[in-house]
Image (cartoon, rainbow, N blue to C red):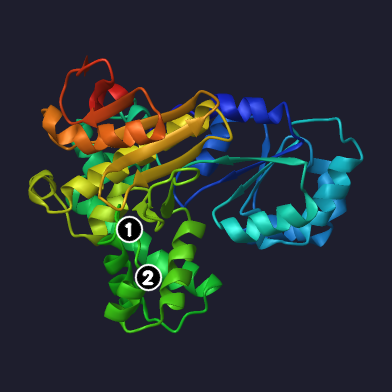
Amino acid sequence: MPLVKRLLSEKLTKYLNLFPIVAIVGPRQSGKTTFAKMELPEWRYFDMEKPSDYGRVSADREFFLDQYGDHCIIDEAQVLPELFPALRSYVDRKRVKKGRIVLLGSVNPLLVKNISETLAGRVGFIEIQPFSYSEAITLRKMELEKFWLNGGYPEPLLWNENDRFVWMEQYMRTFVERDVFALLKTSFSPQQQMQLLTMIAHNHARLWNASQTASAFGVSYHTVNRYLELLETYFLVDRLIPYYQNVGKRLVKSYKIYFRDTGVLHYLLNISSIEALRTSPYRGISFEGFVIEQLMRNYRRESSGTRFYFYRTSQGDEIDFLVYNKKGFHAYEIKTSTTIDAGDLKGFKRCLEQLGLKKGTIVYFGREDFRLDWQIEVKAIHNLLA
């Protein structure tokens, strides 16, 4: 597959100038290894899931780092926890020297736990997800709706519909048969896990109710929440919390969940074609999650410390996506329609007024950008992402 220049390239360069160690994390098959090798072609590469590399590193960690430590990529580093104290000792000998080691990992808690205990202050984190739309279209020309349907995992991006669905089936099978059992030690069979995953997918972009899902599945809500946390751990799901600080009105305080890649979501919802997506009752919530994930990536790439929320009052008025960064708040309303009716935005405008925001943005599936009035800017999703 042709190589695609990732939008995180500049961030990697920046972090290599700030930290002695950079950790690149993300879901399996999202392109971490390809990204690191492409950006750092002269660096040595070691894979801890490869027996020969594992043996080479584990035999004498201090000797390995003395010989190969500078400009070294270590993949699946969490497999060898004993490596982390050796890394700390190694970088501390020349603490001012930056950009020495890159760690790659799919399993967030194991990697983060070891780093937080031993490498705090010495490492910068970069999260890499499957391709964004603007990255994918450099590899293959496609309509945004097609990308929305299929998601951005690099390997199956050039495959046909049937083969891509088979790839996703095997990807999720690996998750339930390997990853879940490695961390959760659950008694659920793979078939039961797929049923639970499908139930969680039906809650995409909706207020999360663990008790309701647990009751339908016949387990405790603690069990369902632990499973949801595992999905977050493996970068498959994200949660969006409500914004309610310093607002007098009674607001909804439950969070929403989103599958981060719509290819995974649509596999679980059995949406396998453009026609099925266009007629699906889940079209609106799928599009909402898709836009939010793409916007989050843009904001995270531009600056760190950005915070994300939704806003909903007990009367049902809502802002789908509320961003807070150094420029203040920005509010987004997300519509799957190809036209915008000002009458549908009364609740959104009431929310803007409650929060003291003078402007907001509507993201829709049309083709043109325009201003609805002095307060509302309308952006076509194609222009916003491409």
Q: Quadrant of the N terminus?
A: top left
Secondary structure state at the residue bearing disc 2: helix
Observer able to see residue 314:
yes
How far across and down, in percent of the image, does residue 69 sit? 79, 41
Q: In which quadrant of the rendered view does residue 22 lie? A: top right
What residue is pinned by disc 2? 210
Amino acid type indicated by mark 2: Ala
**Position of 363 relative to 54 (above/below):** above
Residue 232: give its label.
Answer: none
Residue occupying the point 55% across, 71% down: 183
Left or right relative to 52: residue 87: right
Secondary structure state at the residue bearing disc 1: loop
Residue occupying the point 57% across, 56% down: 108
How far across and down, in percent of the image, does residue 208 sit? 35, 62
Observer able to see residue 141:
no
Asked if the residues shown at circle 1 and circle 2 are in contact, with their CB atoms under 8 angstroms apart, the answer is: no
**Position of 252 relative to 141 (above/below):** below
Label 2 CA crowd tier, 10 Å (few <14, some 14–19, many 20+): some
Q: Quadrant of the C terminus?
A: top left
Amino acid type indicated by mark 1: Leu
How far across and down, in percent of the image, does residue 304 sit? 58, 33
Residue 207: give its label.
Answer: 1
**Position of 237 relative to 327 (above/below):** below
Residue occupying the point 32% across, 67% down: 197
